[in-house]
Amino acid sequence: MIPETFTCDAVTWERAVSLSRTLAAKVRASGFRPDLVVAIGRGGYVPARIVCDELLIMDLAGIRVEHWGTAEHKNERAVVRRPLADDIAGLSILVVDDVTDTGDTLTAALDHLEGRGAGEIRTGVLVHKQVCGVAPDYHAEFAPSWRWVIFPWARHEDIVGFAGKVLADDPADAKDIRAILAGRYGLLAGEEEVLEALADLVASGRAVREGPRYLLAPRE
């Protein structure tokens, strides 16, 4: 169960690239040479492209598996929403994602690819959490305790989600929201980042602005 208060691990672009290169190095060292790299969307797209670059692999495809929404809003189960259209019968495949949580996403991806007749399938992630029930074949970093990892390609989306969670408690202005994000989640968001997140919450109809304060929009 996810606690109400926890510290986020905000990954920089530099660290994300480094983790991706480390993941590629571990795959290379194992002697595994996949015919195809499959990125799990959306978090696996950037790492998978870097892995392909490091390993000089030309064939890259993606599938969309939905499990997590924004800011730790978890859907009921992992579902493949954008299946692979190519013929992969007999191909060796490396599946790449950014992080493991429950392992359901990896499991759904593996079931999908095995059902399409793939050959050997191995999995790799940037950050593998100990609490995950499914161990990938490769990981760049091991997290011995649970934490919410914010990757740079999802930073704005997560700030939007966490700001919404703050507003679910009480109306607040941007300054207060920044302070709550830092205190409750260890998320150090800049003033412009928070204002952009709040603007998107208002534009999407999820929040309304009353003077300097923001509050969740009433449900219809």
Image (cartoon, rainbow, N blue to C red):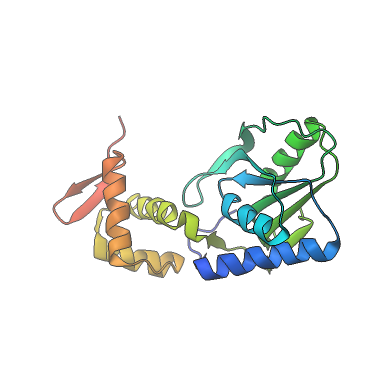
Where 41 sits versus 23, above or below? above
Q: Position of residue 209 (x, y in %)?
A: 20, 48
Q: Residue at (45%, 69%) from the top-left corner?
A: 186
Q: Position of residue 198 (x, y in %)?
A: 29, 52
Quadrant containing the C terminus is: top left
**As rendered, which of 75 and 36 lies closer to the eye?**
36
**As rendered, which of 104 and 89 lies closer to the eye?**
89
Where 82 sits versus 185, above or below? above
| Quarter of the image where one finds residue 182 | bottom left
Q: Position of residue 159 (x, y in %)?
A: 40, 56
Q: Residue at (53%, 59%) from the top-left corner?
A: 3
Q: Would residue 46 be visible to someone looking at this image?
A: yes
**As rendered, which of 3 and 38 lies closer to the eye?**
38
Q: Residue at (65%, 58%) from the top-left corner?
A: 53
| Quarter of the image where one finds residue 80 | top right
Tell me if 151 is positioned left or right of 77 in this view: left
Q: Residue at (48%, 60%) from the top-left corner?
A: 152
**As rendered, which of 146 and 59 lies closer to the eye?**
59
Q: Position of residue 141 (x, y in %)?
A: 68, 67
Where 82 sits versus 7, above or below? above
